[in-house]
Image (spheres, helix red, strand yellow):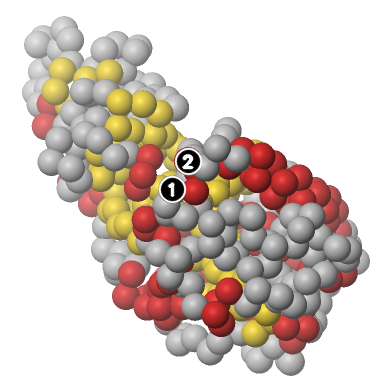
Amino acid sequence: MTFSPTDQFFEELDSSVLSVQKAQALPPVCYTDRNFYEFEKEAVFNHEWLCVGRESWVTKPGDYFTTKIIGEPLVIARNRAGEIKAMSSVCQHRAMLVAEGHGNTNAFLCPYHHWAYSLDGDLIGAPAMEQTLGFDKKAFCLPTLKVEVWQGFVFVNFDPMAEPLAPRLAEVTQALANFDLAHLDGPRPDKPAHFAWNWKVMFENNNDGYHANRLHHGPLHDFVPSAMASFPDLPETTAGYYRFNGTLHQDASFNATQKAILPVFPKLNTEERNRMMFANIPPTLSLVMMSDMVIYMILRADGPETHEMDTGLLFAPGAMKDPLFQQRMAMNMHAANEIIAQDLHVDELVQVGLRSRFATRGRYSWQEQAQREFNNWLVPRYQAAWKASGKKATRIPIHQAEAQADAVTHDC
């Protein structure tokens, strides 16, 4: 099946946001089709807050890191005033990238022709341009994006008119407040992994309690029973969602002892120490929260059936200074990697199944309420984008794209 953008297609998505007892999964074409992915870039990624990393990655003026999402290469930097700036890393001369990797710099120098940009994105040097008629450096700054920091995570938005993120995460913020995410320690993630399946397949799996005691059945996971999942009510306007999952004992953790072997987060109460929390801030951030460790996953779509993902870890302040920290982490990661391998194998085969002529819009168990919450976030954005397109095209009109580009550039 290929994507056919019609009123009927988008009206039928209403069945994905019914109660979990009645809802259907999204159509398989939403996970496989190139045209739908192009539509989705406008419906979701061009206007939503996208997590790109941790504030701790840019602590000093001149610190920067680079990333890429939906084909857009970006550089995130701390400027001289101490502000975090998010910019396109595309040189406004001949499209060479002005930054790679991460580090500390006084300015971004394009290696191709040595155009130089400040930490705010202003063009401050352009050799041998004095004979170019009407050339004005002020007109060639790096396009900038809106930036917001939530719980120590840096988010950017391509839409200069986007509403703030934090007010729409009030319920999620309150639920995870005692983890104190903004002040946790953690190393910079290793090189991102690239996966051959749609970003939504990964996003759904990250908060799917239904499979936990089935796919992961065994001593490394049975102490977090699927039957002990709960799904708090959230407002329709929420920018994120979460579930709690009770555990059979306090301070449960994924290792051979089944218990936390790193320092427990000091602000957690007894109730929080007897459950795990799984939260998603679509379309890019997933959190797995235990008593002694937080796993975060930053998903970055780059095609209809592919995405990259940064995987990071956060610990209580001072935990990494323990002389036995590496040995304790090895115990945790040995178990976690076994569980992750099972998930990745399933995700890969789900993508194969979604391409089949026999793939259908499945029904949900009550333990899959998180999938319905994800649909509740996605479907209105799909339907609004279809309505805004004039029901004539799946891509944003060129004149509108140019106007948006002008608006983004104007603020740099």
Please determine whether, in this image, residue 203 is positioned above or below residue 233: above
Picture residue at 23% right of the left edge, 51% below the top: 407
Picture residue at 69% right of the left edge, 50% below the top: 332
Please determine whether, in this image, residue 71 is positioned above or below residue 271: above
| Residue 82 screen position, x and y as percent | 18, 42
Q: Is mark 2 on a helix, strand or loop?
A: helix
Numbered disc total: 2
Q: Quadrant of the N terminus?
A: bottom right
Which of 110 and 268 lies nearest the eye of the viewer? 268
| Residue 326 screen position, x and y as percent | 61, 38
Instruction: Give residue 318's mark.
Output: 1
Quarter assignment of residue 174: bottom left
Quarter assignment of residue 354: bottom right
Q: Is mark 1 on a helix, strand or loop?
A: loop
Q: How far apart are marks 2 and 1 (CA)?
A: 5 Å
Tell me the crowding category of disc 2: few under 14, some 14 to 19, or many 20 or more residues within 10 angstroms, Cα based.
few
In this orientation, does residue 344 appear?
no
Quarter assignment of residue 114: top left
Q: Which amino acid does label 1 sit on?
A: Gly
Q: What residue type is labelled 2?
A: Lys
Q: Quadrant of the C terminus?
A: top left
Query: 77 left or right of 380?
Result: left
Query: Which residue is identified by label 2?
Result: 321
Picture residue at 37% right of the left edge, 52% below the top: 154
| Residue 216 screen position, x and y as percent | 84, 62
Q: Are marks 2 and 1 in contact (CB under 8 Å)?
A: yes
In this orientation, does residue 273 appear?
yes
